[in-house]
Image: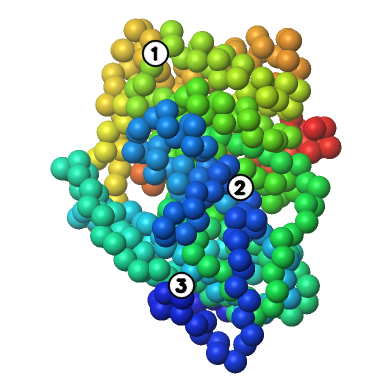
Amino acid sequence: MNASHDPAPGPESAPAAESATWHTVPDLAGLLRGALEVERTEHGLLPHRLPARARAQCADPQLALAERQPSGVRLVFRTRATALELDTLRTKMEYQGAPPRPDGVYDLLVDGAPAGHARTSGGNVVVVDMLAGSAETRPGPVGTVRFTGLPGRDKQVEIWLPHNETTHLVALRADAAVEPAPDAGRKVWLHHGSSISHGSDAAGPTRTWPARAAALGGVELINLGLGGSALLDPFTARALRDTPADLISVKIGINLVNTDLMRMRAFTPAVHGFLDTIREGHPTAPLLVVSPLHCPIHEDAPGPSMPDFSDLGAGRLQFKAAGDPAERAAGKLTLGAIRDELARIVAQRSADDPRLHYLDGRELYGPADFDELPLPDQLHPDAATHLRMGERFAALAFGPGGPLAPEAA
């Protein structure tokens, strides 16, 4: 199968293969999975991973950026088509003084198996000057991603959207009819976490650790990993509460230290309130609380995390802890303190909630993993680590006897 990323002539222009009979899908919204809401804009369909009511309750630009980036969102359909064209308008980020970031990747699955990757061009670019704290948007045209050489039989096709670029869906064309895929009856796994769950430096949208774990576990993923925004917000808890799901996990900790958002006095009741809200909508679903991965800069040092610009010109942005370990006595949070308190909270609550479980994040990525695969910027795992974490989570959570084993839901 072949994939290309030629610039698009525009949503109204003819497809590249003039000899084919092309079918334009009338409404892409019916093919989308993994989004909580779809907004119709002048640029096309914009998938959201938080509903409008939640978005209206927080004006934080970081949250707005994260929830619009469609991590885990994909188009799923059945077709006999051998060629596909998807027009999109993307928005990607660049950082002043650093080399351009890689373009977002579209991953293609055919009957559940990887069948190609592609990138598009054009689109908007937001140039961020981290030293000045400013940003400039440079508009660009619609781009087209193409997949060719698909088998001509009836098949299920999935196009996973880039996990790290805002993506407006403009048009989908195929050289055969397209229809929505039927429900396969798989359990729905709803997950919430930080930029690591969002995808950070994964190689593509099916290669984030949650997507990898979902594929291995045989479950349908809804990924509410929100870069920089796993902050125990009540509106996020309500979004989790109101989203139909069979299996639920929440990964708590690193963003609370990054932002130095709260002290232990606020953290404990906030965790209880977050879990209480989820349980209002999912009173008996298996619910797994996951503590932070191993992250040496914040194991014993509080936040906030501060950027280190010394290697930015070489394309390497590092982070360091700005807090003083002595401040732990005043209740400032560290990853070690958060793990201890999460384990205690889950043990307390599970006496009355036997389907509530705890997983120490160091079982996904611990000190030995850091020695082998260090965090490139001191906070985020690399592409290989995402795959390792996905495999471990699948075994620990979805495997036989695991807290999120589909057969136990």
The amino acid type, in three-letter code, at marker 2 is Gly
Q: SS for tag 3?
A: loop
Q: Can residue 5 be seen from the camera position used here? A: no
Distance in Å between CA atoms under marks 2 and 3: 24 Å
Report the disc number at residue 34.
Answer: 2
The amino acid type, in three-letter code, at marker 3 is Pro
Residue 265's place in the image compared with 118, above or below, is above
Whether residue 190 sits left or right of residue 49 in the image: it is: right
Q: Dot 1: within a 10 Å radius of its alpha carbon, few (fewer than 14), some, or many (20 or more) residues?
A: some
Quadrant position of the C terminus in the picture:
top right
Image colouring: rainbow
Q: Quadrant of residue 31?
A: bottom right
The amino acid type, in three-letter code, at marker 1 is Arg
The residue singled out by tag 1 in the image is: 263
Q: Can residue 47 be seen from the camera position used here? A: yes
The residue singled out by tag 3 in the image is: 11
User: What x and y, as percent, mark residue 115?
Assistant: 64, 69
Task: Give whichever of 247, 316 is nearer the camera.
Answer: 247
